[in-house]
């Protein structure tokens, strides 16, 4: 399956901002009741030294800030994030963003 425009933009922004050791962006939109080819639900895994000495809330704020434009768009309203400092550390949260 080819990556869509929004998915590629997310990958570009996260790569440039966090210089991750591991970055996995998965478009999970097909698992939801949305039109085929949608880019509305993503799971993001980021392992980066950038998160050193940051609390979980700081990591999430950094991701949300980086992807602020994408989160404002009406077609992206779900972002699941796994933010790691190193392999083996797992912290997962779900954010539902809905445009008004």
Image (cartoon, rainbow, N blue to C red):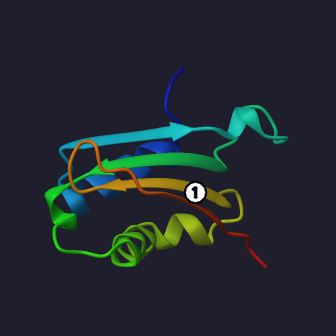
Residue 18 shown left or right of residue 34 in the figure: left
Q: Residue at x 14, y 58 (%)?
A: 49
In the rendered image, which residue does mark 1 sit on?
79
For the image, the number of numbered tags is 1
Horizontal and vertical percent position of residue 77: 68, 61
Residue 39 shown left or right of residue 47 in the figure: right
Q: Quadrant of the C terminus?
A: bottom right
Q: Which residue is nearer to you in this view: 85 or 18?
A: 85
Above or below: residue 61 compared with residue 43: below
Above or below: residue 46 compared with residue 30: below
Above or below: residue 6 compared with residue 77: above
Horizontal and vertical percent position of residue 7: 49, 44
Q: Which residue is nearer to you in this view: 87 or 49?
A: 87
Q: Quadrant of the N terminus?
A: top right
The residue at the far right in this view is 33
Displayed quadrant of residue 71: bottom right
Q: Residue at x 63, y 38 (%)?
A: 28
Residue 95 shown left or right of residue 44 in the figure: right
Q: Residue at x 57, y 38 (%)?
A: 27
Residue 72 shown left or right of residue 67 in the figure: right
Label 1 crowd (10 A; few <14 / some 14-19 / many >=20): many
Horizontal and vertical percent position of residue 6: 52, 49
Q: Secondary structure at mark 1?
A: strand
The residue at the far top in this view is 1
Q: Residue at x 85, y 41 (%)?
A: 33
Horizontal and vertical percent position of residue 35: 81, 38
């Amino acid at each position: 399956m080819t990556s869509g425009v929004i998915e590629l933009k997310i990958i570009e922004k996260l790569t440039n901002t966090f210089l991750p050791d591991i970055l996995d962006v998965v478009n999970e939109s097909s698992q939801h009741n949305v039109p085929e080819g949608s880019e509305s639900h993503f799971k993001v895994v980021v392992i980066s030294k950038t998160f050193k000495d940051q609390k979980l809330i700081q990591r999430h704020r950094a991701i949300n800030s980086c992807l602020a434009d994408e989160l404002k768009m009406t077609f992206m309203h779900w972002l699941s994030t796994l933010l790691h400092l190193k392999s083996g550390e797992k912290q997962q949260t779900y954010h539902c963003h809905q445009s008004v």
